[in-house]
Amino acid sequence: MVQIGNVYMWLAGILSGIIGAMGIGGGGVLIIYLTLMAGVDQITAQGINLLFFIPCAVIALVIHSRKKLIIWRLALPMILGGLVGVAIGAYSAEMIGPNMLGKIFSAFLIFIGLRELFARRKEDDGIKKSSR
């Protein structure tokens, strides 16, 4: 039975919220915690992550919108495309099954991690050039 006072759950939630608000993908942290430490299956962890994301997204949206950090004419077409993607993804997750879904998610995390580790950033180049 899940206990509300579990410190690790609170920490996973806080860390996921911080990372999610930064736009980095807090769901990755939350899903990893739920599947590896809490023993929740992949599809259930994804459902919990989606529920977790709703209030976090609303708060982040309000803050980013107040700071004029959203270009709505660019965001709206992506939102509509995302809604189509959600329908396809939810249906596909059911068809793929939890074992394969876990493998796909793991491969995706490894790919993104390697890409981030070895990617050259434009900002880094600018810093190097300006410091010469």
Image (cartoon, rainbow, N blue to C red):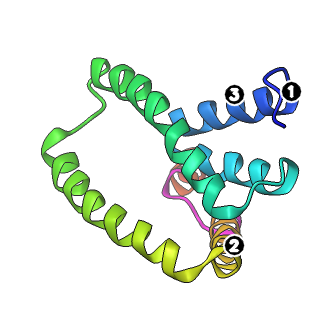
Q: Is residue 91 left or right of residue 14?
A: left
Q: Residue at x 76, y 54 (%)?
A: 40
The residue segment tinted magenta is 117-123
Q: Closer to the observer: label 3 or label 2?
A: 2
Q: Which residue is mark 2?
A: 102
Q: Nearer the viewer, residue 111 or 40?
A: 40
- In terms of sequence position, does the residue under pointer 3 or pointer 1 come before the other? 1
Q: Which residue is mark 3?
A: 14
Q: Is residue 112 left or right of residue 58?
A: right
Q: CA distance from mark 3 to mark 2?
A: 23 Å
Residue at x 24% of width, y 56% of height: 78
Question: Is 25 displayed left or right of 88 in the figure?
Answer: right
Residue occupying the point 59% across, 45% down: 48
Residue 97, x across and y down, in percent:
61, 78
Along the viewing direction, whichever of 126 and 120 lies nearer the viewer:
120
Residue 104 lies in the magenta stretch: no
Q: Secondary structure at mark 3?
A: helix
